[in-house]
């Protein structure tokens, strides 16, 4: 029983980590509180629903197309909403509120087009495998494998390629990077593109399991924030630690109390963390002034 | 005529909400997402006081202000230790915790089914407010009182210190003022007035459920302040009127009810983006967020 809780928690946590990586890619490099990220998450799932369910296109092709579309949407959000504000030297609060504005528009457009009820992408019930007393469904297995692959490649790319080095450079000093000759706008778009891919993958994996409704994005986003703050904003490794932590907290809550208290428990732990260790498990203490 | 009164009552409720939220958002630059939590606490307390204890209006409102203010204090103390983005996340977390409790603790709050049959509030003795016009007078009195209160607060020395904190916190600290204490004051005052709106909502609609007090409602109240403007009284006042009347204008275009709810949100979202881009201080406000 204990092992089952851990496994459920870890797999849920891996998905949160995946999404958190995508969000953190934007937050650490551009300092933008990308609330619209929640839209990318549900957009991808609805696209899969559109292509696979409504038009009968092969599931793999549907996923591929929707991942691509989501990544493009991500770049579009940056170009249309964030860049004009940054050029105007708007404060980050203003950018965040615009992001919230876009999120409201997108969620309600999706609601208008697809309806408010929960849609299901996966029609047949999933079979499960049993290892050592632990039951894992095929869907969970796919979720775990894809998440681990993505996270792994993210770190490989991040540590060893130009892309990763540029990300850290962009975070530290954008102007200097520009002076040194790097095309900061282009790599910025690249990061938004990659962030979109992560959001899309996470979205499709999660909604394949539990279905999709227009407001899922917001609740998932809150889990992502919590994961990032607990792990420690500013470090990519933090997303993994934080994500796993949140996944485990939720799993344990379901076992000890009931699933309806999952959110409250996670939030409570979050608040405790904010008070005791706001820099997160892996972060560094920052002096304010 | 009844319908116009209904609109005016709702506008008054939102005027109180936005003028109170403005104290935090526009005067101290504290972007709180927890307004709906206090709105909900006020409403549920009202249900308790009117159904179980049959309190008359004046003690009821005062008690609700006190209790909502105390809950504001409880939430303020931990969250005000956080800076910037972390503060926003902290208030967001508390907002969701309150919502989760209202929604899931069915023994206390009847959960998702909500509480119906909230009786009309009475002034004294048997004189109860039950007509639309009565509620209009009640809501107008309360919103007028709130607007006047905040108008004079903004102009007072206390208001000046808040403005100073907004512009440059470090200078205020170096002048020897306890900034955190002032922020907590602002938070508590703001939340206790939001409780009044909760009272009005619960007693007027006579049915409350947790989904009226979720994060979307918080964002909606924020929208009123953002669109109307922050930093003065005119802004939030205009904002409240605006956001309540926009859906009514849509009605004239013959838009069906089913898409109305979503369409008005789309319009709000669009307005937020446009205002943030082209007029960040809002239509009638004087302060752009930092």
Image: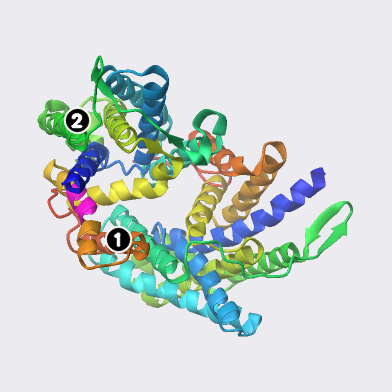
Left or right: B111 as drawn, with respect to B17:
right
Q: Position of residue A199 (x, y in %)?
A: 53, 66
Q: Position of residue B183 (x, y in %)?
A: 29, 31
Left or right: A40 as drawn, with respect to B135:
right
Magenta-drawn segment: B239-245
Indicate yes or no whether the magenta region holds residue A40: no
Secondary structure of the residue carrying tag 1 is helix
Residue B169 drawn above or below residue B262: above
Residue A85 drawn above or below residue A286: below
Q: Which residue is mark 1?
A: B264
Quadrant holding the C terminus of chain A: top left
Task: Note whether residue B219 is visible.
Answer: yes
Q: Residues within 10 Å of mark 1 (few under 14, many from 20)?
A: some
Indicate yes or no whether the magenta region holds residue B243: yes
Query: If you read the primary sequence from the N terminus, does the residue marked by circle 2 or circle 1 appear first?
Result: 2
- State the residue at coordinates (65%, 50%): A247
């Amino acid at each position: 029983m204990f092992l089952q809780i851990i496994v459920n928690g870890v797999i849920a946590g891996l998905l949160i980590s995946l999404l958190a990586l995508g969000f953190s890619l934007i937050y650490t490099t551009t300092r933008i509180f990308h609330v619209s990220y929640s839209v990318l998450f549900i957009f991808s799932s609805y696209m899969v629903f559109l292509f696979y369910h409504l038009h009968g296109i092969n599931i793999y092709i549907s996923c591929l197309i929707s991942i691509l579309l989501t990544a493009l949407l991500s770049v579009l959000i940056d170009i249309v909403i964030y860049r004009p504000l940054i050029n105007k030297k708007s404060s980050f609060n203003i950018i965040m509120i615009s992001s919230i504005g876009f999120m409201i528009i997108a969620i309600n457009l999706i609601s208008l087009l697809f309806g408010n009820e929960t849609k299901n992408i996966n029609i047949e019930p999933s079979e499960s495998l049993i290892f050592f007393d632990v039951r894992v469904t095929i869907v969970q297995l796919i979720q775990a494998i894809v998440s681990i692959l993505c996270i792994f490649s993210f770190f490989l790319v991040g540590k060893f390629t130009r892309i990763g080095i540029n990300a850290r450079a962009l975070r530290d000093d954008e102007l200097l990077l520009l002076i040194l000759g790097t095309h900061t706008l282009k790599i910025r778009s690249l990061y938004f593109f990659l962030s979109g891919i992560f959001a899309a993958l996470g979205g499709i994996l999660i909604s394949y399991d539990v279905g999709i409704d227009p407001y899922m994005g917001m609740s998932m986003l809150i889990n992502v924030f919590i994961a990032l703050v607990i792990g420690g904003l500013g470090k990519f490794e933090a997303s993994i630690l934080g994500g796993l932590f949140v996944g485990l907290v939720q799993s344990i809550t379901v076992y000890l109390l009931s699933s309806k208290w999952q959110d409250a428990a996670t939030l409570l732990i979050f608040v405790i963390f904010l008070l005791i260790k706001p820099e997160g498990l892996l972060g560094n203490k920052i002096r304010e002034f | 005529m009844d319908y116009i009164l209904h609109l005016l009552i709702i506008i008054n409720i939102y005027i109180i909400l936005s003028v109170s939220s403005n104290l935090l958002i526009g005067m101290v630059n504290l972007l709180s997402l927890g307004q709906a939590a206090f709105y909900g606490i006020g409403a549920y307390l009202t249900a308790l006081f009117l159904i179980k204890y049959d309190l008359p209006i004046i003690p009821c409102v005062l008690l609700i202000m006190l209790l909502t203010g105390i809950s504001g204090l409880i939430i303020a103390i931990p969250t005000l230790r956080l800076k910037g983005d972390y503060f926003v996340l902290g208030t967001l977390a508390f907002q969701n915790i309150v919502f989760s409790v209202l929604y899931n603790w069915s023994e206390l709050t009847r959960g998702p089914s909500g509480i119906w049959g909230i009786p009309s509030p009475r002034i004294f003795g048997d004189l109860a407010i039950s007509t639309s016009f009565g509620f209009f007078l009640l809501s107008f009195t309360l919103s007028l009182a709130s607007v006047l209160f905040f108008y004079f607060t903004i102009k007072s020395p206390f208001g000046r210190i808040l403005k100073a904190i907004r512009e440059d916190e470090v200078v205020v600290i170096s002048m020897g003022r306890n900034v955190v204490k002032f922020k907590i004051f602002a938070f508590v005052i703001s939340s206790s007035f939001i409780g009044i709106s909760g009272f009005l909502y619960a007693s007027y609609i006579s049915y409350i459920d947790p989904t009226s007090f979720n994060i979307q409602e918080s964002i909606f109240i924020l929208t009123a302040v953002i669109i109307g403007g922050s930093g003065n009284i005119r802004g939030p006042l205009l904002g409240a009127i605006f956001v309540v009347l926009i859906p009514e204008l849509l009605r004239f275009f013959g838009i069906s009810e089913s898409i109305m709810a979503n369409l008005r949100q789309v319009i709000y979202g669009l307005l937020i983006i446009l205002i943030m881009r082209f007029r960040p201080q809002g239509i009638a406000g004087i302060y752009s967020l930092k």
